[in-house]
Image: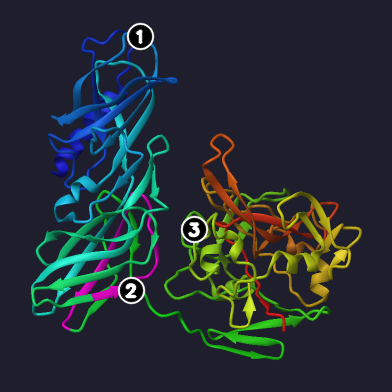
Amino acid sequence: MKKSIVAILSATALMACQKTENPMPESNTVRISPVLTRVTDVNFEDGDQIGLTIMRGDETYAENSQLTFSGGEFSGSLTWYAEAAETSTLTAYYPYDASGAPATFTVASDQTTGYEDSDLIAGTKSGVTPSASAVVINFKHLLTKIVLNLTNDSGSEITAVKLSGSKRTADVDLNAMTATANASSSAEDITAQEVSAGSQYRVIVVPQTVAFTLSVTTASGTVLEQKLASTELKAGGQYTMTARVTPEGLDVLISGEIDNWTDEGEIGPDTPAEEVSFEEFDGYFVYDGEEYKTVTLSDGSVWMAEPMRYVPEGYTPSGDPAADSHIWYPYSLSGGGDSINATEATALTDDESIRKYGLFYDMYVALGGTDVTVDNCYDFEGAQGICPPGWHIPTRTEFFNLCGLSNKNALGESGNQINTEALFYDADYGGGKRTLYEEAGWNYVLSGVRMMTNFNSTPRYQLTQLYSGNTSLPEDYYGMPGLTYHMSSTCYKPIYSTANPEELTNIQFFAQMTTFTKIYPEGRINVAYISTLSGQQLRCVKDAR
C-alpha cells in the first residue's frame, strides 16, 4: 500500500509541474487529485465522495457539487466555466453531505460503524484556472484522532471501549480550514472502533481541551474506568493512550507511534494535584527541594529574589523556542558584535545557568495547566498558579507599584500611566530604573524572553542584546539579552483580526519589561503587555496579610 502512495504522489507532483498558457482544456470536466492519506487506510477509496465549491471572486460558480473518487481522482458531472484565463478558488470537503457544505459537524457516538464518516477532511486552493489536468489539492484532517492500545490481563474478553467527556459537535469554517468545539453542545460518550481484536481501538473527536474518562467493559459485565489528564487536542493531531486492563481496574501507561497524522503525544491518567514540598524561612524558601532567596521591600511586599525554575510533573523544558512545550530553557546570545541584535541564540541547559536565569513559562503552565480563553482571561488576577502556597503570580498593580510606568492602564486604554511614588521610579527615566531594583536586593536577572507575538506567529528567542550603543553597564554585560519580561496574572485584552473581526488572533497579559537605549543606558522598567503563548521569567510575590 505504501508503494501506491509513492506512485500517487509522484503523479500529482508531475501534474503540478506541467505548465499551460491557459488554453481551453480538451476535456472540460472538473477533476481533483487529492494529496492526503486518509484515516481508514493509506488513501481515499473508490466510491468516496467529496463536496466541491468553486468561487470566481465573489461569484459562486459551483456549490457543493458531488465528486466521486475513482482511479486516484475525484470527478463527476461538473464542468469548467468557459473563460479559461479567469482564476477561481476551489474548496472541497469529505464526507459529502447532500444538504450542503457543513457549518457544523458531529462525530458519531458509536464509531464501531461510524468511524470513517467521522473523519472530516477538507482542502482549498486559490488561483486555479480551467485545465484538462486534475487540480492538485492538499487536504488535511480538521478533527483529532485518538488511538487506544490495550493489554488485557483481566481474564475476560473486552466487549466495548468508550471515551467520555468530550463535545461531539464542531463549528466548521471551511474557508479558514478550522473546526472548533461548539460552545452550546454537551459532552457525550463515544464508543471506539476496534482495530485489532481486544488490543487496539480508535476514535475521531472534535479538537478541544478535555479531561476524558476511559471506560472498558468486559464480557463478565465489569466496567473499569480511569479519568485522564486534561489535554488540549489539536486539529489533525493523533494522540495515543496505552492501558493495561486488570481485574481491579485500568493502569494507563504512555506509548505511541504515528502514521500519517501529526503526532501530538500521549494522554496519561489524571492524578490528584501534585503536592510539592515547601518550607519558608527568613530571607528564603525551599520549594520542591530548590532554595530561592526572597527580599522584603520597603513597602512590606515580599518577592522572590531569583527566577522560578520549578518544573511541574508531566512537563519537560525545551531548548527549541518553536516547540509547544509550555516551558523553555534560558539562552545565551552570540554573533551580534557591536550591534543591537545578535544573530544566534543558544539554549542554556546546564544546572548553573538554570539556577541563575530560571526557566521560561507560558501562561498555560504558569496557571497550573489552565487554558486562557476570551471568557476567562480576566479571572486569573492574583492566581497562585505554580507559585508555592501563600504566594502568587504578580498582578499588574504590583509591578506598577515597583516601576511606576505602564503604557496601558488596567482598562486597556492607551496612554502612559505614571506613578511617581512607585518604589523604583526614577524621574529622569520616567519609569523604573533597573539599578534601583538591584540596590533594593530584587536582583533583576536579564534572561530574555521566548517571544510569540500572536497565535499565528513563529515563536523565537528574542535576539535584542546589550552592547556599547545601548548601555553604560560594564562590558561583561555585553551580549546579554536586552529585553526581559516578567509575567503578571492580569489580562490586558483579547485581540481580533482587523480583516475578520470574529477571528481571535491573540490574548495579551500585562508584564514587566526592560528597555535599554542611549537614553536609558542602565535599563528602564515599565509595564507592557505580551501574548499568553510567550515564555517569560516568573517571579512570585507573597500574599498580603
**Residue at numbered disc 3:** 320
**Which quadrant would residue 538 be assigned to in this image?**
bottom right
**Residue at numbered disc 1:** 83
Magenta stretch, main secondary structure, is strand
Which residue is at 77% across, 59% downward?
526
The C terminus: image quadrant: bottom right
Q: Pointer 3: residues within 10 angstroms few (<14), some, or many (20+)?
A: some
Tell me, yes or no, if residue 115 can be seen here: yes
Distance from label 2 to label 3 (Cα)?
27 Å
Q: Pointer 1: residues within 10 angstroms few (<14), some, or many (20+)?
A: few
In this view of the protein, which residue sits in the foreground, 282 or 1?
282
Distance from label 1 to label 2 (Cα)?
59 Å
How far from the left and from the top, in percent, is residue 281?
Answer: 67, 91
Magenta range: 225-247
* Label located before the other in sequence (2 or 3): 2
How far from the left and from the top, in percent, is residue 412?
Answer: 71, 52
* Label located before the other in sequence (1 or 2): 1
Which residue is at 41% across, 34% downward?
175
Q: Pointer 2: residues within 10 angstroms few (<14), some, or many (20+)?
A: many
Q: Amino acid at mark 2?
A: Pro
